[in-house]
Amino acid sequence: MNTVKWKVEGMTCSHCALTISNYLQKEGLKNVRVNPIDGQVTFDIDGQPVQEEKISNGIESLGYKVLSTKEGASHEKQMNPQLRRECHKLRREISVNGWDGRS
């Protein structure tokens, strides 16, 4: 079983995460996790011949942008330092309040 990890841009709320999660599950992917806070999307491919490009295109057809892991990491580094601090602060507050970002 392979685990795929992507960074997805454009999620602004839990409804966005739910939309992506439902799409991935409909495509037959397992252990789907979508975090609208940091844009992390992970899922398992259990031996089925699933083309990552097809899945990526499907997510983009929903109005989001799939970045590779490297692009996602560099995107956050390029973010305005004040905005990056605010994002991290919000992630901590959400985590402390008991929500783990999973749909």
Image (cartoon, helix red, strand yellow):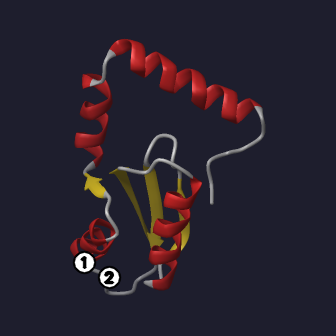
Q: Position of residue 57 (x, y in %)?
A: 24, 72
The percent position of residue 28, horizontal first and vertical second, equals: 47, 84
Residue located at (68% from left, 27% from top): 93
Q: Position of residue 18 (x, y in %)?
A: 56, 65
- Kindly identify which residue carries mark 2: 50
Inter-mark Cα distance, 1 to 2: 8 Å
In the displayed structure, 94 sits above or below 78; it is below
C-beta proximity under 8 Å, tags 1 and 2: yes
Q: How many marks?
A: 2
Q: Nearer the viewer, mark 1 or mark 2?
A: 1
Residue at 34%, 69% (x, y): give it. 62
Q: Is residue 45 above or below residue 4?
A: below
Horizontally, residue 5 falls left or right of residue 100, namely left
Residue located farthest toward the top when viewing the structure as drawn = 82
**Residue on which the image places disc 1:** 54
Q: Find residue 97 and report its image quarter.
A: top right
Kindly identify the residue that appears in the image at 25 percent across and 78 percent down. 54
What residue sits 32% from the left and 82% below the top? Answer: 50
Q: Is residue 2 above or below residue 74?
A: below
Q: Position of residue 95 (x, y in %)?
A: 69, 34
Work out whether residue 51 or residue 26 is closer to the camera in this orientation and state it.
26
90 versus 68 height, above or below: above
Mark 1, secondary structure of its residue: helix
